[in-house]
Image: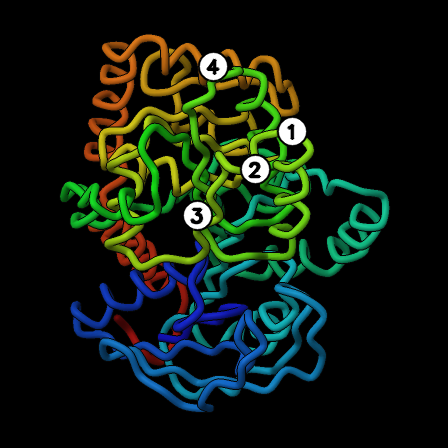
Amino acid sequence: MHYVSPHFYPDIGGVEDHVLRLGRHMVVEGHEVTVHTSRISLAGASLPQQDTIDGIMIQRYTPGIKLGYYATTFRSRIGAGDILHCHGYAFLPNDFAVRHYHGRMGTVFTTHHGVRMTPPNLRARMLRRLYDLRGLGTLKKADRVFTSSQADKQWLIERNVIPRKIEVVPDGIADDAFIPGAKAFAQRHGLTNYVMFLGRVHWEKCIDHLLSAVAKTNRRNLQVAVVGPDAGAMNELRQVAEKLGIRDSVKFIGQVSQDEKKGLLAGCALLALPSLYEAQGLVVLEAWAQGKPIVASRVGGVPDMVENGVNGLLYDWGDIDELAASISEILDDPAYATKLGEAGRTTASERYRWSSVAERIEVIYASVLAERPFRHKI
């Protein structure tokens, strides 16, 4: 089987981690897996044209155009296979792959970042509308379309994607994420009582909202740990922290290993996710696996996972006062914080184990191949 992804290992991110875990599962199940991806890393480094990791073959292509994460073009050269699984709506190489190889093998498309998201500015909205003219046609050609939320499924149905082709398949979390992290990692960064953000340091994640909310709580000993790779916003966020008078309380940790991430989650008071949009919000599951309460904006697929007041707190995106109040509500009541975290851990364990998600994907692959007379079968 063949996977097409904007970027892949050694790059780290939601899509990259998903493809890596899915590929590992399929290799263990006895399938041959090749990932087709960009030869230029997110940091701009040139990577080997061919590589392997955990039995997954990697074929990298030099982009014809590279203007950003999704504005990267290459044409995958795919040989024989049963399944072509493309990852990322609005990623041009996926359109080429589905249209070129549909009919030769089963085609599956995971949208990932949320197709119903309203772009944040006029230019982005115009580009998205222009892309939809092609992208929706690509989804209509695919044998199956995976979304992470019911809201995204409804958006696709309203645009005439056949309902039976759409599967709501949320991302999952690995079993080892539930192993308690080492809190010593927090101590190494001088963190004691802190709210944590985890993800790409990008303006769409609205970390500035979190910094403003923390300043509003007026808690002198409260820190903010911003954990994740810089996607262009870190320097300006430092200036935001300076203007808010909390510069010394904000720690920009950067990209970390899996073990360090778990340790930082284990040591935090809560995880905050103030994003403009999240197709699902995998970091919520990662915090829950460590038994931590979460505060998140009520956007995208987040409400599909989080039941307000039961396993986390939701607030209306952009409402800084409500975000500050939600943070204070958790910090002021340790027993309530523990209750939310334990309920979240139960939710993650019972509904979002990666092994169950991967097995479901494999069943869907088999159903795709059963419907059409492709040469090969899983």
- The percent position of residue 272, horizontal first and vertical second, equals 45, 30
- The percent position of residue 326, horizontal first and vertical second, equals 47, 14
Front position among marks 1 and 4: 1
The residue that mark 3 highlights is: 227
Relative to 2, does residue 61 appear above or below in the rendering?
A: below
**Looking at the image, which is closer to me, 222 or 20?**
222
Kindly identify the amino acid type of the residue bearing the numbered disc 4. Answer: Ser
Front position among marks 3 and 1: 1
Question: Callout 4: helix, strand or loop?
Answer: helix
Distance between the Cα atoms at labels 2 and 4? 22 Å
Give the mark, 2 or 4, whose residue is nearer the N terminus: 2
Residue, x 34% and y 47% (percent of image)?
189
Circle 3 residues within 10 Å: few <14, some 14–19, many ≥20 = many
Residue 307 lies in what quarter of the image? top left
The residue that mark 1 highlights is: 244
Residue 38 lies in what quarter of the image? bottom right
Q: Is disc 1 in contact with disc 2, using a CB cutoff of under 8 Å? A: yes
The residue that mark 4 highlights is: 326
- The percent position of residue 111, horizontal first and vertical second, equals 53, 52
Kindly identify the amino acid type of the residue bearing the numbered disc 2. Answer: Arg
Residue, x 45% and y 38% (percent of image)?
197
Distance between the Cα atoms at labels 1 and 2? 8 Å
Give the mark, 3 or 4, whose residue is nearer the N terminus: 3
Give the mark, 2 or 3, whose residue is nearer the N terminus: 3
Distance between the Cα atoms at labels 2 and 3? 16 Å
- The percent position of residue 342, horizontal first and vertical second, equals 21, 22
The residue that mark 2 highlights is: 247
Q: Is disc 2 in contact with disc 4, using a CB cutoff of under 8 Å? A: no
